[in-house]
Amino acid sequence: MSQDPSHLDAVDPLQAFRAEFAVPTMAGREIAYFCGNSLGLMPRATPTALSRVTEQWQTQAVEAHFTDDDAWMNYHELARDGLALIAGAKPIEVVAMNTLTTNLHLMMVSFYRPTAQRRKILIEARAFPSDRHAVASQIAFHGGDPAVDLIELAPLPGASTVDPAQIEALLEREGERIALILWPGVQYASGQRFDLQRIAALGARFGCAVGFDLAHAIGNVPVDLHDSGADFAVWCSYKYLNAGPGAIAGCFVHERHAHEHLPRFAGWWGHQASTRFRMGPEFVPTPGADGWQLSNPSILSLAPLRVSLAQFQRAGLPALRHKSVALTGWLAENLITRLGDHLEILTPGDPEQRGCQLSIRVRAGRQAGRDAFEFLAAAGILCDWREPDVIRASPVPLYNRFSDCQRLVDALDEFFRGQA
Ligand SMILES: *Cc1c(COP(=O)(O)O)cnc(C)c1O
């Protein structure tokens, strides 16, 4: 049966990383934080990194663009290798810029090019609202009608997750009319993980552009963007990447587009770096994902991202995934064996089809679910609530412990006993 959590914590090779994070406390005790899918905890090195930027500003002002190893002029380059690593991409394919929804729009300007015959966008039903707003508004912007041109693929009746075979069947029927497939790496509500390579290959077979929203995948599950063959991907950096509220987001453009002059919304930071400061009127895109940058980036936002990426590089992605599978597996197994009469897990049971998040539904209904969620919060166990009736709990391998998971299971057990 499942192993003792304090033993598992003691032999965890990543245990030292927890001390690198600030864990909020309640009544003097560290809370059990399961909201890394929403806002990752702050690395303790982040305030120092921010102070470094304000010190440069204070002491050097505009000269800080040029003087140090971490001069601001090419500062976004300092995030490149870390981003390439966690995105499974080549350095030329990734850039840190803007925010997720902005990047999604910029990518659709280039990769959603509807024609009379092929103008639809395929997304998942109950997509994150911002994604749905973005695709619907792009369709309308091109003179289309979202009611006709937006296809939202729902799980089969009675299911909580989409069977990838459904995507294939839909493309067999509609593929020739679909201009763009926008699909999540990990679905935010269900926690279901998708095989990027399989979806991108399907898109290629039917001539559709393919983009991924990796908001819940990046820093959570292995991601192989280059090999997947996707055209583009976008993600935010404040969830599993721990780069802070509103952090600068990420964007991937596949290498095969690196030297194409695709239509795009342009800005001076996307212009060829060597001639940017000649201040000429013509736009010449710099190769790769960098060519989609608009503005000079927020250094105050990039500094925390660098801190976070360095942690991922030190921890190593295979070690993180290994712990993540064990941690979430322990939680899932204990929830089901001890509390399966009271709750169900909507997230797939197969570790390959999920990341660290479990989406939990209390069988007694929405109100009991809310009560359970609030009972946990009062006990210093922070999960999050997603309407209509889901408690999301995401044990993050960089800072969560098996003993955090045990607290969650024990507290839920106590809650259900009180209900009886
Ligand atoms: C978190 C999240 C967003 C948030 O978008 P922002 O532009 O960063 O505010 C969008 N889409 C998905 C799927 C998300 O999970």
Image (spheres, rainbow, N blue to C red):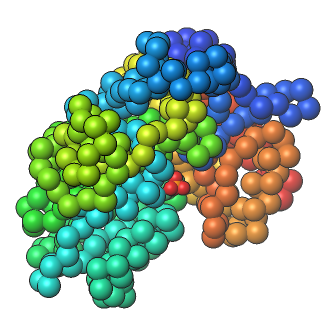
Q: Answer left or right for 407 relative to 4.
A: right
Residue drawn at point x = 63 percent, y = 70 percent? 388
Q: Position of residue 188 (x, y in %)?
A: 49, 56
Q: Is residue 393 above or below residue 75?
A: below
The residue under the point 75% across, 40% down is: 381
Left or right relative to 303: residue 176: left
Decide which of 195, 68 is in the foreground and name it. 68
Residue 119 at least partly seen: yes
Q: Nearer the viewer, residue 367 or 42?
A: 42
Image position, residue 100 (x, y; %):
45, 52
Residue 343: in sight, yes or no? no
**What x and y, as percent, mark residue 371?**
80, 60
Tell me which corner region of the image, top left, top right, bottom left or bottom right, holds residue 401: top right
> Taking 154 as reference, is 405 left or right?
right
Q: Quadrant of residue 157?
A: bottom left
Residue 326 on image: x %, y %: 48, 29
Q: In front: 79, or 194?
A: 79
Total marks in image: 0
* Image quarter in which the N terminus is found: top right
Rendered residue at 10%/65% (across/down): 207
Image position of 254 with respect to 25: above or below: below
Residue at figure coordinates x 76%, y 55% from the top left: 372
Examine the image and state in which quarter residue 20 appears.
top right
Which quadrant would the C terminus be assigned to in this image?
Answer: bottom right
